Image (spheres, grey):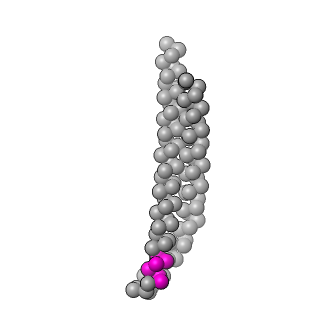
Amino acid sequence: MLRRARTIGIVIAAIGVAVLIGFGSVAIRDSGDFSKAKLLRERNPGNAMYDLQFFVATSQIAFLVSGTVAGGLLALNGLTLMLVGQLARERETR
């Protein structure tokens, strides 16, 4: 049981870190598109096309940031499960 908890914790933490890095790198790379859409919207107030481009860019960034946060929380859950396995192992050896 203890070994399973640590193993599952390691797998979950690894998946969480992969998701965190993946979404985070795409969010950083696409932040230029968001800045461009924001600038075009500010320069052309009331233009429906630029408002729509800004909405799409905002939605994409929100999705990517949410994925980054979800990856971080998943990694934290994996680390917690690893810690529980370690604490149970120490408790068992007493």
* Coordinates of residue 50 in the picture (x, y in percent): 47, 82
- Position of the N terminus, as image quadrant, is top right
Asked whether 51 falls inside the magenta stretch, the response is yes
Image position of 61 with respect to 18: above or below: below
Give the residue furthest to the top: 94
Image position of 48 with respect to 25: above or below: below
* Coordinates of residue 82 in the picture (x, y in percent): 53, 32
Q: Residue at left 58%, top 61%?
A: 26
Q: Residue at left 49%, top 41%?
A: 76
Image position of 33 with respect to 28: above or below: below
Q: Residue at left 48%, top 52%?
A: 69
* Coordinates of residue 19 in the picture (x, y in percent): 57, 51
Give the residue furthest to the left: 46
* Coordinates of residue 14 in the picture (x, y in percent): 59, 42
Number of numbered discs overlaid on the protein picture: 0
What is the span of residues highlighted in magenta in the rendered image?
49-54
Q: Residue at left 52%, top 43%?
A: 75
In the displayed structure image, the side of residue 7 where residue 39 appears, left or right: left
28 or 89: nearer the viewer: 89
- How would you classify the magenta stretch by its main secondary structure? helix
Asked whether 48 falls inside the magenta stretch, the response is no
